[in-house]
Image: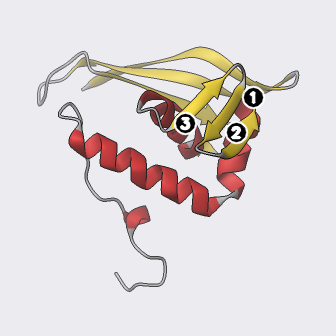
Amino acid sequence: MRIDIRKIAQIKKGEDVIGSRTRAKVVKNKVAAPFKQAEFDLVYNEGISRESEMLMFGEKYGLIKKMGSSYSYGDVKIGRGYDSARVFLKTNKAIAKEITKEILKQMKSDDSFSVSASADDKDEGSPE
């Protein structure tokens, strides 16, 4: 398998670059269909940002509304600007979990996605 990974944009907080929007494209694959691609945000010293994925998929499925540069989830104002919305979701775990459940529900009803349970979906106190 050969994957082409490219930086397509910078993520900035003020003037500082804190990460990059990245596109990964499967160029060669003998096991499955090639030329599939994914976009995700790599935040320096954090890794792939789950909060950015929540914003992206929440907006796609109409759960998160973007008006100008402001993001909102129902009556809750998430933040003004992409980075402040990402930080809000990172600090408010209950709202982030609720948004994630709604996104997964939408994805399961969408025929183009295959969703499987991850370790993060389990209760933190339950034995594995």
| Quarter where residue 48 is shown | top right
Q: How far is disc 2 from disc 1 in space, using C-alphas?
A: 6 Å
> In the image, what residue type sits under mark 3?
Ile
Disc 3 to disc 2: CB gap under 8 Å: no
Label annotation for residue 32 = none
- Is residue 48 visible to the viewer in this orientation of the structure? no
- Callout 1: SS: loop
Point out the tag, 3 or 2, that comes first from the N-terminus: 3
79 or 39, nearer to the observer: 79
Tell me the mark number nearer the camera, choosing from 3 and 2.
3
Counting from the top left corner in percent of width and height, residue 40 is at 50, 30
x 64%, y 46%: residue = 75
x 48%, y 37%: residue = 58
x 18%, y 23%: residue = 29
| Quarter where residue 114 is shown | top left
Q: Tell whether 13 sits left or right of 33.
A: right
74 or 22, nearer to the observer: 74
Residue to which mark 1 is pinned: 81
Q: Tell whether 107 sits left or right of 103.
A: left
Label annotation for residue 64 = 3
Disc 2 to disc 1: CB gap under 8 Å: yes
Q: Tell whether 127 sits left or right of 9.
A: left
> In the image, what residue type sits under mark 2?
Ala
- Callout 3: SS: strand
> In the image, what residue type sits under mark 1?
Gly
Counting from the top left corner in percent of width and height, residue 96 is at 57, 54
